[in-house]
Structure formats: C-alpha cells, structure tokens
Image: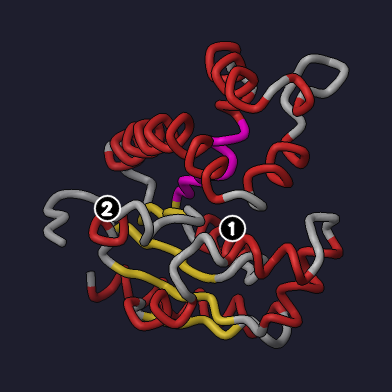
Amino acid sequence: MDNTGNKPIIGILGGIGSGKSTVAAEFAKLGCKVVDADKIAHELLDKSNVREEIVGSFGKAILEPSGKIDHKKLADIVFCDGEKLSTLNKILHRLVLEQAEELIKQYNSQNQVKAIVLDMPLLVEVGWAKKCDNLIFVDCERQIRAARAKKVGFFDENQLKIRENFQISLDNKSSVADNSIDNNSDFSTLVRQVTEIFSDIVNNG
C-alpha cells in the first residue's frame, strides 16, 4: 500500500483469545497508537440512537436493568445465529469503520506517533488488510486460547468454535501475514518478538 507521508499501519490478526490486544498494547508502549474496534463498538452500543436500533432488532431482553445493552447477552445471541450476526454487523460495522478512519486521520497528524496499530477482529473480512503496511499474525494454540477466553469469563471451547466459524480461517489469516508472533510461551518472549518486528517496520518502512 502506498502510505506516502503517513504513519505505517500495522494490522493484528489472530484467533479469539490469541493475545491480539496484548500485542497491540506492547506496540502502544513503543510509541504506537492503537485503533481498537471492540472498544469502538462497545462505546457505540452506549449511544442512544445505536441502542434503539439494536433493541428494535433484538428486543428488550438484551438490556440490563439500567437500560444499557448487556454486551454478553447480545454476543450470546448473535454468535449462535449467522443471520442475527449479520443484522448486528449491518448496524455497527459502518459506524465502527467510520470512527476507525477518523482515528487514523487524527493519529497521522500527531508527530510523536510512530505507527498506527489496527486491533480489529474482522480486519481481513471487511477488506481492511489492504490498508495495512504490515500484517502480523498472533499464533496461539486453540487449547491456550480457549483457556484464556474461559479465564476472563467469556466463553467455553465450544463457543470459541462457533464464533470462529463466522471468521475467515486462521490458516488464511496466517498466509496473508508479513510477520508471525508466537504466543504459546511466556510474556517476555512475546515482548521480545514485538520489539524486533517494530524495529524492522520503523527502520525499514
């Protein structure tokens, strides 16, 4: 991609629970800005116009007593039904991508920012891989990913499989990546790999 005059854009790929956000956080420590699609989506769910549209599609059962959307209830509904997931994506995707574009523009104008990291679960699926100068695949065994997802109270291994059925296969994501980070061992190994890749990108970009 021709990114003349702009910061390098780094896309993070990987399965659910692989440690994509941990990798993104390490890049942030090195002077990068992170565009976190999940965070943007969660913030959008709290906006009244978006909330109304989602409640109109999924009913009031997804609301907490406070009137806010219960993110877990909503996720449990959409990840068991491709049609419902598609409905949610139609409401949220365009808004998430618009906000991500806006953040990229902001970060490009900030001198201290060394690179922009896209932490977006559906990066390849929505065609944003081509916006990236460098794609990094976070490689992590399914058992470890399932254990991590369960530990933070997300879902069990069966739900992990269901959710990943709605995404492009990890083999495909791995094959389009420029770099791979092995996240099957300890944290210091992950940090070392991030630092090496970052150094390559910044020095050879």
Viewer-closest of 141 and 4: 141
| Left or right of 64 in this view: 115 | left
Q: Which residues are magenta?
A: 33-42
Relative to residue 8, is residue 52 depicted above or below?
above
Q: Earlier in the sequence, mark 2 or mark 1?
A: 2
Q: Give residue 65's position: percent from left, percent from top.
A: 87, 18
Q: Which residue is mark 1?
A: 25
User: For residue 104: magenta?
Assistant: no
Viewer-closest of 183 and 38: 38
> The N terminus lies in which quarter of the figure?
bottom left
> The C terminus lies in which quarter of the figure?
bottom left
Per the image, label 2 sits on a secondary structure element best described as: loop
Q: How is the image coloured?
A: secondary structure
Viewer-closest of 178 and 70: 70
| Left or right of 105 in this view: 82 | right
| Left or right of 137 in this view: 5 | left
Instruction: Count numbered badges in the picture.
Output: 2
| Left or right of 118 in this view: 105 | left
User: For residue 40: magenta?
Assistant: yes
Amino acid found under the numbered disc labelled 2: Lys
Q: Give residue 194's position: percent from left, percent from top.
A: 51, 75
In the picture, the disc for residue 7 is 2
Q: Residue at x 64, y 51 (%)?
A: 79
Q: Residue at x 59, y 58 (%)?
A: 25
Q: Give residue 7's position: percent from left, percent from top.
A: 27, 53
